[in-house]
Amino acid sequence: MRKLILIIVAALFAIVSVAPAFAFEKGNERKGKYTYRKVYQACNDRGAIESAKPAVNPDDKTQSQWTRIFEKSDFSGTFGCEEEWKALSQDDLADIYAYLHDHAADSPSPAKCK
């Protein structure tokens, strides 16, 4: 009986500790970079911003900060261009998340938008 309880507790602990890793599907970072730039180009074409260059670079935040932003879906507060961000599909958001997260300041390969 004790073994069974121990196994159940260990299984629950494993599930709880691994679950946050599956919060976002792994997107395509190449598509994410393209889509991220496309969002700002559309926003610039609409006249909402002065430059089509993204205002926020991937290395402006850490991986955990990018995760918090995408968990809260706080895109307009962080990026601006609210209309364009609302129009994105979940797949597009997963791709952009992959790009920003994988090139964050504390990642093995931090990157800036060019």
Image (cartoon, rainbow, N blue to C red):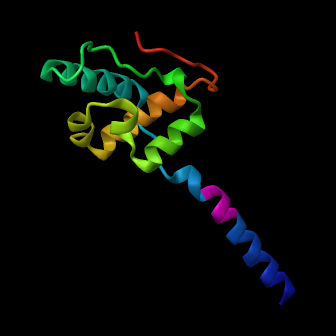
| Left or right of 25, for residue 51 | left
In the rendered image of this protein, does residue 36 appear above or below residue 74? above
Identify the residue at image location x=46%, y=49%.
71
Identify the residue at image location x=57%, y=50%.
21
| Left or right of 2, for residue 29 | left
Residue sitting nearer the eye, 90 or 53: 53
Q: What span is colored magenta in the figure?
A: 14-18
In the rendered image of this protein, does residue 111 appear above or below residue 81? above
Quadrant in the rendering for residue 5? bottom right
Identify the residue at image location x=46%, y=34%.
98
Indicate whether residue 6 is drawn in magenta: no
In the rendered image of this protein, does residue 29 appear above or below residue 57? below
**Quarter of the rendering occupied by the C terminus:** top left
| Left or right of 55, for residue 35 | left
Name the residue furthest top. 114
Name the residue furthest bottom. 1
Residue 90: image x %, image y %?
32, 46
Residue sitting nearer the eye, 18 or 69: 69
Quadrant in the rendering for residue 113? top left
Residue 50: image x %, image y %?
24, 14
User: Mainly helix, strand or loop, the magenta region?
Assistant: helix
